[in-house]
Image (tube, rainbow, N blue to C red):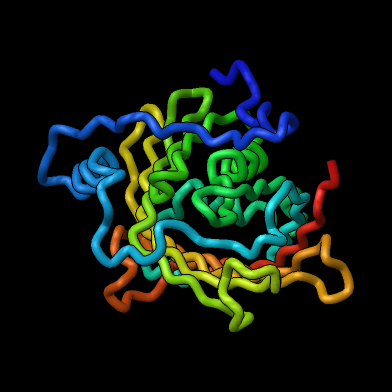
Amino acid sequence: MLIANTVVAIGLGVSPFLTTPAVAVADDSSSPIYEVKKMLSALPTAITGMGKPDVPYPVVFRGTWKVSQTITDVVENLNGVSSRPELVMRIESFRDSPLDLTRYYSQFDNYVILDRGVSMNNLFKVLYKTPTITTFDPQNPNVVSTVFPDGSKLNMLTTKRAVEDLSGEGVSSDSGAVGYSELYRILEEPTGTSPRLYAARLLARYKTDPDNANRILGQERLYFYDDANADGGKAPTVVIKSKILMNRIVE
């Protein structure tokens, strides 16, 4: 399925943003999956109460980073849930070895943002051990869509976002500290079986290493819920905690 590497533009100093294609809407309007696909197809229409259009990172983040993500704890509270989503199982499979990734941050509309297309594509290639195609449009940062070689798909829709200024100087300063929370609806569409819709929440904090401006330290906490609603006070079924070490790749 994947013929060419989607990150070829990085070496040229060109932002490798990809444009998200239109998403077809299912016929069954009674299904919650229909509602997510309807929201996906309607974007980039703004979501009320969404918060910032994307996370604005400190300017020191701009560039390409080698990332080592180490899972420090996994808490499961399955509450009778028969199985975990494929994405959750893939992340949990790295309990005993770090995830070695590459993240790319670039300038867009006066802010430094994470290129979710390139960075998520790198993540999924490691998690699923297969080439993937991930699409992302910085003008519509709330949708990230991934297609796998067998035709299966994974769509992530950000439905709520809050950004925390950890430095008191504004998140776009060069202080190098930022925190944020994002709420997602995730739709897995495997080939040959039924789609699965669930919710997740990411809490993340990053700061520049005070002894090394080319190193960033972070913590991430991922909460997964067994349905599409994570705002109703329901306990998560899986919580994955990890620490992040990012070293700048000097070109």
Q: Nearer the viewer, residue 235 or 212?
A: 212
Task: Report the residue at 44% width, 43% height from top.
Answer: 144
Q: Who's the residue at 66% across and 73% down the image?
A: 177
Q: Is residue 27 above or below residue 237?
A: above
Q: Quadrant of residue 241?
A: bottom right
Q: Is 132 situated left or right of 138 in this image?
A: right
Residue at horizontal 71%, vertical 46%? Answer: 102
Farthest right residue? 211
Is residue 234 something one can see in this rendering?
A: yes
Number of marks: 0
Q: Position of residue 245 (x, y in %)?
A: 77, 62
Q: Position of residue 152 (x, y in %)?
A: 43, 30
The quarter of the picture where residue 11 lies is: top right
Quadrant of the image for the N terminus? Answer: top right
Q: Name the residue rendered at 78%, 50% in the picture.
A: 66
Q: Nearer the viewer, residue 239 or 251?
A: 251
Residue 76 visible? The answer is no
Residue 60 pos. (x, y %) = 72, 61
- Residue 49: x and y, percent? 28, 67
Whether 169 is drawn above or below 181: the answer is below
Screen quadrant of the C terminus? top right
Farthest residue toward the front?
Answer: 110
Left/right placement of residue 50 relative to residue 100 reads left
> Quarter of the image holding residue 243?
bottom right
In this rendering, position of residue 209 left or right of residue 240: right
> Compared to 218, does 39 lie above or below?
above
Q: In the drawing, does residue 57 fall left or right of residue 40? A: right
Question: In the depicted view, which residue is nearer to us: 192 or 152?
Answer: 152
